[in-house]
Amino acid sequence: MSRVCHKLEDFMRQRRIAREIALQVLYSLEVVEMEAGEAIELYWAHYEAPMDARPFSSLLIEGAWKHRDQIDSLIGGCSANWSIARMSKVDKSILRMAVFELCFCEDIPPKVTMNEAIDLGKVYGSENSGSFINGILDALYAKIHKKNDEQEIAPPPERSE
């Protein structure tokens, strides 16, 4: 295997670890009231984490937590029979992280974000978490793309003179 492939594998592995850390910290923020930065520092103080994974996990945690009201609104708009309050803390944490990635991390392909979230749901969530997360993210992704497509083809606003 080439050196480039090994580096890519290492990069992807670090991203997976970062997402797992972010899930744990976001979950803890659901249980214990504290600031995201404080929760991150507590995690670093008590658990070993690769240095390469820390910046991305911190970005996910801080971003998802900072924008959680906006993110929760997007999730709620795509979950027909489930309010945010009814969702499990694990599923909610995974969804918040994934929606943050979809909306704020343009360098990450949406399909990667969605697949990673589904995989996390299968590993850490309930028996149905993977399909539940998949359904919500698919609906959200479709809404985002429909909105973007409409903006691209929308006529320019009229000038007021």
Image (cartoon, grey):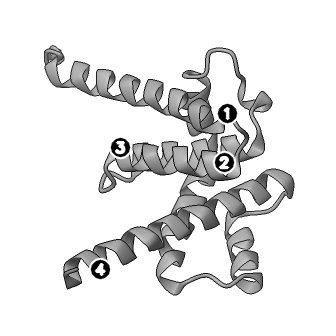
User: Looking at the rendered structure, which numbered label has been put on residue 6?
Assistant: 4
Amino acid type of the residue tagged 1 in the rendering: Asn
Mark 4 nearby-residue class (10 Å; few <14, some 14–19, many ≥20) = few
- Label 1 to label 2, Cα distance in Å? 15 Å
SS type, badge 3: helix
- The numbered disc on residue 111 is 3
The alpha-carbon separation of the residues under discs 3 and 2 comes to 18 Å
Q: Is residue 62 above or below residue 5?
A: above
Mark 1 or mark 4: whose residue is earlier in sequence = 4
Residue on which disc 1 sits: 128
Q: Amino acid at mark 2?
A: Ser
Q: Dot 1: what SS?
A: loop
- Residue kind at label 4, given as amino acid type: His
- Between circles 4 and 3, the one closer to the viewer is 4
Q: Is residue 12 left or right of residue 4?
A: right
Instruction: Tell me, yes or no, whether the two marked residues, 3 and 1, touch with CB atoms within 8 Å.
Output: no
Task: Using a 10 Å C-alpha cutoff, classify the residue at mark 3 as few (fewer than 14 neighbours), some (14 to 19) or many (20 or more).
Answer: few
Residue 27 x/y as whole percent: 74, 55
Q: CA distance from mark 4 to mark 3?
A: 22 Å
Label 2 secondary element = helix
Q: Which residue is mark 2?
A: 93
Looking at the rendered image, the disc whose residue lies closer to the viewer, 1 or 2, is 1
Dot 4 falls on a residue whose secondary structure is helix
Disc 1 to disc 4, C-alpha distance: 33 Å
